Amino acid sequence: QVTLVESGGGLVQAGGSLRLSCAASGRTFSIYAKGWFRQAPGKEREFVAAISWSGRTTYSADSVKGRFTISRDNAKNTVYLQMNTLKPEDTAVYYCAASRKNVVDIKADEYDYWGQGTQVTVSS
């Protein structure tokens, strides 16, 4: 089993920055690609960004391109999401996900493990 724990969420003003972290524990050798998703109140969970095991391949949603950056440190079993120029519409619970496949995928169904989520609130 794999456990994912997110941290770094909080309240920030529009235009500000936050860095989310997601630490994996357990059978970490079995996971490869990782991703971030978010869910705002009353909305469906949506893809934010994903990264391959090596970190050489990344993909981000159009809504966050140029503002959010995903990265990972395999030695620490941690994936990060640097969020800059935050907007009120970025307010959501952010979830970390991990896949047993090394495929950068935007579909939530392709991920096998999920964290509990961390709240990000951006005030205007």
Image (cartoon, rainbow, N blue to C red):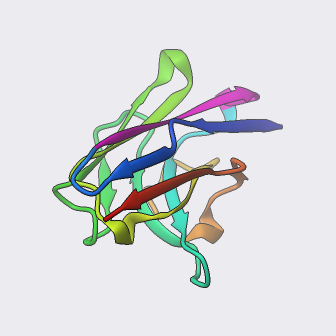
State yes or no: residue 27 in magenta. Answer: yes
Q: Main secondary structure of the magenta part?
A: strand
Horizontally, is 102 left or right of 85 in the view?
Answer: right
Q: Quadrant of the C terminus?
A: bottom left
Frontmost residue, 26 versus 92:
92
The residue located at (48%, 35%) in the rendering is 79
Q: Position of residue 95 (x, y in %)?
A: 59, 54
The residue located at (21%, 61%) in the rendering is 65
Q: Position of residue 57 (x, y in %)?
A: 30, 47
Residue 106 in view of the camera: no
In the orientation shown, which residue stands out farthest toward the left?
66
Frontmost residue, 24 versus 67:
67
Q: Quadrant of the N terminus?
A: top right
Horizontally, is 24 left or right of 89 in the view?
Answer: right
State yes or no: residue 36 in magenta. Answer: no
The residue located at (76%, 29%) in the rendering is 27
Horizontally, is 82 left or right of 67 in the view?
Answer: right
Frontmost residue, 30 versus 81:
81
Q: Position of residue 111 (x, y in %)?
A: 63, 58
Residues in magenta, as a range: 17-29
Horizontally, is 20 left or right of 82 in the view?
Answer: right
Q: Position of residue 58 (x, y in %)?
A: 31, 50
In the orientation shown, which residue stands out farthest toward the top?
75
The relative height of residue 103 versus residue 77 in the rendered view (above or below) is below
Residue 19 in view of the camera: yes
The residue located at (25%, 71%) in the rendering is 62
Frontmost residue, 93 versus 102:
93
